[in-house]
Amino acid sequence: MVFIGFLWVFHFYRIFLSSGRLRLGIFPREIDGLLGVITAPLAHSDMGHLISNSLPLLVLMTIIFYFYRRIAWPSFLLIYVLTGLSVWVLARPVYHIGASGVVYGLVSFIFWIGIFRRNLKSIILSLVIVIMYSGYFYGLLPNQEGISWESHLFGGVVGIVVAFLFRAMIERDEIVVDPWADESDEEDFLLDRDTFKLTKWEREERDRMGQGL
C-alpha cells in the first residue's frame, strides 16, 4: 500500500509541479534513457493508466509480501530492475513508461514459483493467478498501439528467472515435517517403533541377537 500510495503521489506531483513526462521513461540503448530503469515504473500517461496498474500491483504485492516473506523484497527489486534493464537493452527505440512490466513480472513470478516448488500453498496461489490474470496473455502480443508489449514480455521472462533463483528458499510453513522422524525415547510410545515394519518372528530374532543368545 505504501508503494501504491507513492505511485499516486508521484503522478500528481508530475502533473502539477513537473513536466517532461517522456524524460522519465526508458529509452533503449541511450545513456539518458537508462535512468528510466528506476523512474519509468513510477510514471504513467494518465489516470486510467495509473489505475490499471495500481489494482493488480496491490493484489500481487500483497500476495508476495504475505505468503513469500523471506524472498519478497529481493524478488520485487530484482523484477523491478531486471525488467527495466531488459527493456533498455532489447526494446524498440521509443520511450517506455508505466509499471505494467513489473506487474507482468509479479504475475509470472507467483505462477512459476508454484510450478518450481510444487507444494500445496504455492500451487493454489498459481491457480489463483491463472484465474485472475489469464487475460494478460494478450498483452504479450507485439505491435499494439501505445502499449509497451516489450515491457510485458521481458517482465514475464524475468519473473520466471527470479522464481527459479528463489525456488529453494521456502517459507517456514512450507517445510514438510515427517511425524515418524521424531527422536523421542522409545518408552514414550505404547508400541515398538517397528511394530508395523517387522513381523513378530523378526522382532523376537532381533531381541535374541541383542541379548547375545
Image (tube, rainbow, N blue to C red):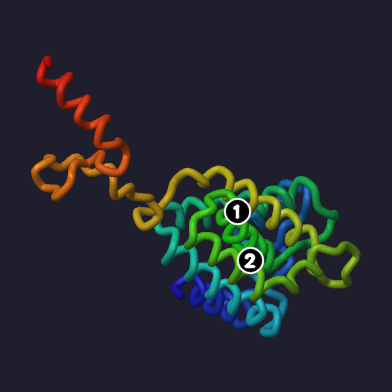
Secondary structure under tag 1 reads helix
Viewer-closest of 165 and 174: 174
Bin the neighbour count of mark 2 within 10 Å (Cα to Cα): few under 14, some 14-19, many 20 and up.
many
Which residue matches tag 1?
Answer: 115
Q: Please, what is the three-letter code of the amino acid marked with disc 2?
A: Val
* Apparent side of residue 207 relative to residue 8 in the rendered image (left or right): left
Residue 211 position (above or below residue 104): above
Residue 100 lies, in percent from the top left, at 68, 67
- Residue 103, numbered circle: 2
* Apparent side of residue 103 relative to residue 165 in the rendered image (left or right): right
The CA span between labels 2 and 1 is: 19 Å
Which residue is rendered at x = 61% and y = 60% of the image?
A: 111
Outermost residue to the front: 201
Viewer-closest of 47 and 140: 140
Secondary structure under tag 2 reads helix
Which residue is rendered at x = 22% and y = 41% of the image?
A: 193
Residue 188 position (above or below residue 1): above
* Apparent side of residue 106 relative to residue 143 in the rendered image (left or right): left
Q: In the figure, residue 89 lies in which quadrant?
A: top right
